[in-house]
Amino acid sequence: MFKSFLLRQTLKAKMKNVPEAEREQMIALMEKNPDFFKKIGEEVEKRVKAGQSEIAATMVVMREHQGELQKLLK
């Protein structure tokens, strides 16, 4: 429960410019599939450490997992 609270607070801070409905949808997805999003985070972190910008790394990783993300959104 505490972990869930921290996750929500962190995501709200990171996604402060995202509309509330979309933010809640993403938080719900992350809570339902934490391993998938952990894997994405690790891949982004690996690319950032290799010298890519965080935005570029995130875009590449999200494109790689686009099919899985679309399944989760349905």
Image (cartoon, helix red, strand yellow):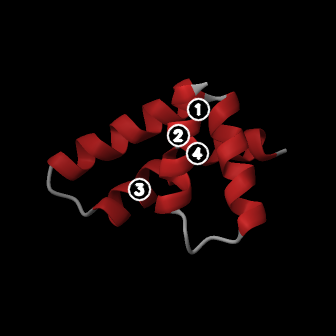
Distance from the alpha carbon under mark 2 to that under mark 3: 19 Å
Distance from the alpha carbon under mark 4 to that under mark 1: 6 Å
Q: Nearer the viewer, residue 22 or 71?
A: 22
Distance from the alpha carbon under mark 1 to that under mark 2: 5 Å
Q: Secondary structure at mark 2?
A: helix
Distance from the alpha carbon under mark 2 to that under mark 4: 4 Å
Q: Nearer the viewer, residue 11 or 5?
A: 5
Name the front one of labels 3 and 4: 4
On screen, 50 above or below 43? below
Residue drawn at point x = 58 percent, y = 37 percent: 5
Q: Position of residue 45 (x, y in %)?
A: 28, 44
Q: Is residue 8 left or right of residue 47?
A: right
Q: Which residue is mark 4?
A: 8
Residue drawn at point x = 78 percent, y = 63 percent: 21
Q: Are marks 2 and 4 in contact (CB under 8 Å)?
A: yes
Question: Which residue reaches farthest bottom?
Answer: 17
Distance from the alpha carbon under mark 3 to that under mark 4: 20 Å
Amino acid, disc 3: Thr
Q: Are marks 2 and 3 in contact (CB under 8 Å)?
A: no
Instruction: Give the number of the disc on residue 7.
Output: 2
Amino acid, disc 1: Ser
Q: Is residue 43 left or right of residue 51?
A: right
Q: Which residue is mark 3?
A: 58
